[in-house]
């Protein structure tokens, strides 16, 4: 590897060899054979790395050739019109592509009966008690340690009143209480900020479900009246389940995906 | 401590006597006044306890009507619904001076509210984009995204003919006022003419370079209009073209708009109105295509237009019985008579709905400033319709509500809420008492115009309802939408 520009400098000063261009051309022609010989001989890690790089090169080369050939390709005439017909008054208006209204309530009722859901996050990391709770000392001499403070986000609901502080075993700090969730519709890819109605199930245990702890993988019930969904029977859908997809205590907000 | 029985009995009797003494002979002096302001008959002295039905009998006698016509009565813009005495007490009106009661004739026939889906007619393989009953009410045509126009048989509620010919989505269908032609416009800009009885294609009108947004036939009462031959089309290429259906040639081409033409209406006074996304409405002369007037009032796209005589223009010589007139002369005479009845000698009114959330009411042949600007909606207005008698205006908007306005002055009357998605289309029944609205939330709702309340809720569609139409004989409602099924609703 030349370390400086002395080759270029010499070429500028004295010019190139007379047969320089021909030698260059022939050397480049031999490169192909040399590369092929190297590819066949190289073994072990070197061989693998070379093969991977070569594969990528071949793929991009194929794509560029196909693109150039498009010009001469013949295409079948478009039979019929494009999909998703809209009437004249909706043309050139940005409309969210709605997923068809299916019998969502019936499906959800069936799932509830079975007690199982097909959820986007089937497995979540189990959370231990010492991660979930922080021991709070109480008593005159601060020796009693039966109180616990929940270190994760909780949902308490509107009519929530604490138990008398003297008898309260689980403390839910107000700073970690949240009422809204950012819910994404999986097909529309649109996110809405919707109110939480309740915590349905926390995968870490039914004690946490009862306490209202919201961690990753928790199933919440959210208020979807904003979305304007209607069942085929004409009733308006106002509550749906959603599963939390982030760690709310780290982000400060609850992100969830709607279970349709 | 209860009272002795004799005292209780005495008290009861005294109470009864007091009731009997209440005055039953209180009377008011009234003067009937027609909707146009002329007084009818002499001043009359009538008791407090008179009801609207009795007033109706009285009025029919005064006007010497052969058949008893139904009327509705208004005192100072408030409709009289119960006893006269109770109405006055509630309204706090004085009984000292002569009371002016304004009467308005109602439609003689009554349309029954549609309550059930009698047929779900599948057939289209893509969303149904537009549905229209013929002016006589006996035929139904629908255009869909699968490029076909279908004619449906209303008696058996099955598909009759499938009209193939378009190469792209069929966006608009329009019947000629004598029901001899069916015109349909598509996404490529071509207009095809069909014969409704057989479903045969009669010809193609090509000239527009982009999609057709709206079609409108020449009304039947105009001289030389019957048999129907001329219609106007508006398109995305910013032009309005007038075509002759017999020769399929473009007779006039009007281009003054700088953005696409959203709606075209052939008026009854010799003007063609076109609304456009360049926020203006133009009025063109129908004979030579010259620009007569430009109405600038809106701040954003004008989406829709409606005329007060719209129902009469659409139905031509047919009335609610659906009987075909004997020959062309009889048809022309009937059409002229119906048009005169719809306008009652006053100039036509034009209402426009826009993306700037307001409506504008104009008298286009009189002047270019709007009579009224109707505000109140919080989202864009998709469709405005006049009631068949021209008394009310309805506006359907994307803010999930439908608003009712007075048709003569443009004052706000009521908001009708019930839908949970944007309301796309609205259709009046032929007697102006009921209307149906279809929305994105897949339901159709039938409302009463007098009580301004929801009458019937018609769920059933599986997806958005794009189009609703009420037949001119009032018997059925047809609706179609994204779920590709056409539904017929009857009483």
Image (cartoon, coloured by chain):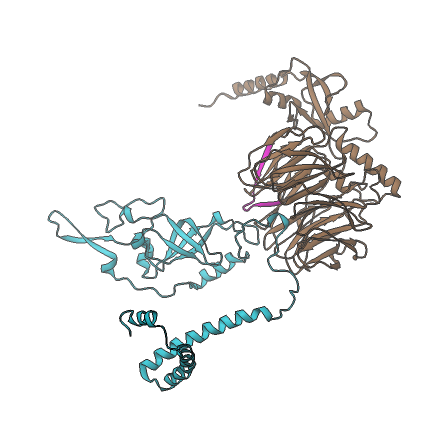
Chain colours: A cyan, B brown
Q: Is residue A84 visible?
A: yes
Residue B419 within the magenta-colored segment of the rendering? yes
Q: Nearer the viewer, residue B483 or A201?
A: B483
Q: Residue at x 54, y 50 (%)?
A: A94
Q: Is residue B25 visible?
A: no
Location of residue A117 by image quarter: bottom left
Residue B60 within the magenta-colored segment of the rendering? no
In this rendering, position of residue A94 left or right of residue B250? left
Image coords of residue B451 (percent x, y) = 63, 34
Q: Residue furthest left?
A: A141
In this rendering, position of residue B440 left or right of residue B97? left
Q: Nearer the viewer, residue B382 or A71?
A: A71
Location of residue B217 by image quarter: top right
Q: Residue furthest front?
A: A14
Numbered marks: total? 0
Q: Considering only vertical position in the picture, is B450 above or below B477?
A: above
In this rendering, position of residue B165 left or right of residue B334? left
In this rendering, position of residue B413 left or right of residue B196? left
Q: Residue furthest top?
A: B96
What span is in magenta?
Answer: B413-424
Image coords of residue B300 (percent x, y) = 57, 39
Q: Considering only vertical position in the picture, is A160 above or below A109?
A: above
Image coords of residue B87 (percent x, y) = 63, 23
Image coords of residue B447 (percent x, y) = 63, 40
Q: Quadrant of the N terminus of chain A?
A: bottom left
Q: Nearer the viewer, residue B22 or B245?
A: B245
Q: Considering only vertical position in the picture, is A4 above or below A139?
A: below
Q: Residue at x 65, y 41 (%)?
A: B257
């Amino acid at each position: 590897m030349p370390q400086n520009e002395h080759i270029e400098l010499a070429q500028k000063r004295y010019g190139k060899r007379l047969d320089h261009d021909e030698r260059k051309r022939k050397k480049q022609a031999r490169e192909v054979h040399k590369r092929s010989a190297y590819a066949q001989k190289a073994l072990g890690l070197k061989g693998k790395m070379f093969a991977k790089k070569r594969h990528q090169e071949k793929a991009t080369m194929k794509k560029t050739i196909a693109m150039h050939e498009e010009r001469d390709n013949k295409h079948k005439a478009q039979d019929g019109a494009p999909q998703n017909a809209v009437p004249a008054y909706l043309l050139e208006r940005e409309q969210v592509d709605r997923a068809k209204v299916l019998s969502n309530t019936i499906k959800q009722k069936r799932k509830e009966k079975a007690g199982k859901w097909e959820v986007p996050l089937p497995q979540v990391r189990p959370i231990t008690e010492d991660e979930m709770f922080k021991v709070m000392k109480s008593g005159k001499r601060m020796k009693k340690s039966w109180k616990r403070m929940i270190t994760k986000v909780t949902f308490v609901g509107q009519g929530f009143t604490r138990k008398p502080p003297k008898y309260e075993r689980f403390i839910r700090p107000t700073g970690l209480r949240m009422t809204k969730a950012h819910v994404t519709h999986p097909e529309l890819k649109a996110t809405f900020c919707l109110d939480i109605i309740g915590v349905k199930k926390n995968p870490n245990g039914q004690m946490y479900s009862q306490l209202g702890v919201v961690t990753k993988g928790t199933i919440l019930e959210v208020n979807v009246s904003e979305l304007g969904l209607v069942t085929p029977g004409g009733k308006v859908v106002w509550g749906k389940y959603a599963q939390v997809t982030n760690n709310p205590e780290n982000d400060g907000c609850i992100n969830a995906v709607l279970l349709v | 401590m209860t009272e002795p029985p004799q005292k209780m009995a005495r008290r009861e009797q005294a109470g009864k006597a007091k009731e009997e003494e209440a005055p039953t002979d209180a009377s008011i002096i009234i003067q009937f006044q027609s909707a146009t302001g002329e007084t009818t008959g002499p001043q009359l002295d009538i008791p407090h306890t008179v009801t609207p039905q009795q007033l109706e009998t009285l009025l029919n006698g005064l006007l010497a009507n052969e058949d008893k016509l139904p009327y509705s009565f208004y005192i100072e813009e408030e409709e009289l619904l119960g006893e006269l005495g109770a109405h006055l007490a509630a309204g706090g009106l004085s009984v000292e001076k002569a009371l002016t009661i304004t009467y308005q004739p109602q439609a003689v026939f009554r349309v029954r509210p549609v309550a059930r889906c009698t047929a779900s007619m599948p057939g289209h393989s893509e969303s149904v984009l537009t549905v229209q009953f013929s002016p006589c009410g006996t035929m139904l045509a629908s255009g869909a995204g699968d490029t076909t126009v279908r004619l449906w048989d209303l008696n058996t509620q099955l598909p009759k003919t499938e009209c193939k010919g378009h190469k792209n989505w069929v966006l608009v269908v329009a019947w000629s006022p004598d029901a001899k032609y069916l015109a349909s416009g598509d996404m490529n800009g071509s207009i095809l003419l069909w014969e409704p009885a057989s479903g045969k294609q009669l010809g193609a009108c090509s000239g527009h370079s982009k999609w057709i947004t709206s079609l409108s036939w020449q009304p039947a009462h105009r001289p030389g209009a019957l048999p129907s031959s001329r219609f106007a089309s508006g398109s995305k290429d910013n032009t309005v073209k007038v075509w002759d259906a017999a020769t399929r040639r473009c007779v006039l081409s009007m281009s003054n708009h700088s953005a696409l033409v959203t709606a075209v209406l052939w008026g009854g006074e010799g003007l063609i109105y076109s609304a456009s996304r360049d926020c203006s409405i133009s009025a063109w002369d129908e004979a030579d295509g010259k620009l007569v007037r430009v109405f600038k009032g809106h701040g954003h796209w004008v989406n829709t237009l409606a005329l007060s005589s719209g129902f009469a223009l659409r139905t031509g010589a047919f009335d609610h019985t659906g009987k075909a007139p004997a020959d062309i002369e009889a048809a022309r005479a009937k059409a002229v008579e119906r048009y005169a009845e719809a306008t009652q000698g006053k100039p036509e009114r034009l209402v426009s709905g826009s993306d700037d959330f307001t409506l504008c009411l104009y008298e286009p042949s009189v002047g270019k400033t709007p009579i009224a600007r109707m505000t109140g909606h919080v989202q864009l207005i998709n469709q405005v319709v006049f009631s068949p008698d021209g008394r009310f205006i309805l506006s359907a908007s994307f803010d999930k509500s439908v608003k009712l306005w007075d048709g003569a002055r443009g004052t706000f009357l009521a908001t009708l809420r019930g839908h949970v998605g944007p309301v796309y289309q609205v259709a009046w029944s032929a007697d102006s008492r009921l209307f149906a609205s279809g929305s994105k939330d897949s339901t159709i709702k039938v409302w009463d115009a007098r009580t301004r309340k929801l009458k019937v809720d018609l769920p059933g569609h599986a997806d958005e309802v794009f189009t609703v139409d009420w037949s001119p004989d009032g018997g059925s409602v047809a609706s179609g939408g994204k779920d590709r099924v056409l539904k017929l609703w009857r009483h």
